[in-house]
Image: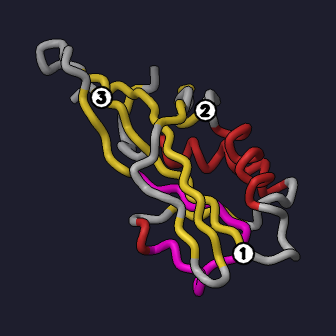
Amino acid sequence: MFEIKDNYLAAGDALTQLLEPLVTSQKLKKIYQANELSEVDERSQITPAAHVLYLGDGLQETAQGGNSSQVKQTWLVVLACRLSIHERPAGELLVSLLNAVVSKSAQVDGQMLGPFVRVNSAVKPRFTKSHGYYPVALSVILRFKP
């Protein structure tokens, strides 16, 4: 289990790392790490793209006297696509995205971080006149030792 030492948000780096092959294969043009969902805006991005956002965490009920705790972090990967016949269909991109991250782990700071498990998303898909935004929620369990 990944132990949080210096970067509480290291799982975002791991997700970005897992998504990088989609950029290399040109299925995605860019991966953004956003601070909040309102930053996912079609005026300032290249598509298709993935936005990685931290949604928060929960603590397990069984803490070891406060010396160590397991943290279940939830992350959102939002696939942003133009609704155009000139781009790859969103359904194909969602399959590629899911294959890249679900049940996968990545090495961060010399440790394996993951696996990422798909969970129900509190965020619904959103559509504008020109873009579609497809959220995929993932959770990962980490250890924090103060």
Residue 7 image offset from top left, x and y in percent: 39, 44
Mark 2 lies on residue: 107
Of label 2 and label 3, which has the lower sequence position? 2
Residue 37 image offset from top left, x and y in percent: 43, 66
Q: Which residues are magenta?
A: 39-54
Of label 2 and label 1, which has the lower sequence position? 1
Q: Residue at 73% across / 37% down in the picture? A: 99
Mark 3 lies on residue: 144
Q: Residue at 58% across / 45% down in the picture? A: 15
**Disc 1 residue type?**
Arg
Say which element carries label 3: strand
Say which element carries label 1: strand
Question: Rounded to the nearest whole Å, what is the CA distance between mark 2 and mark 1?
Answer: 32 Å
Q: Determine whether 142 is above or below 48 in the image.
A: above
Q: Residue at 27% across / 35% down in the picture? A: 58
Say which element carries label 2: strand
**Disc 2 residue type?**
Gln
Residue sitting nearer the eye, 110 or 74: 74
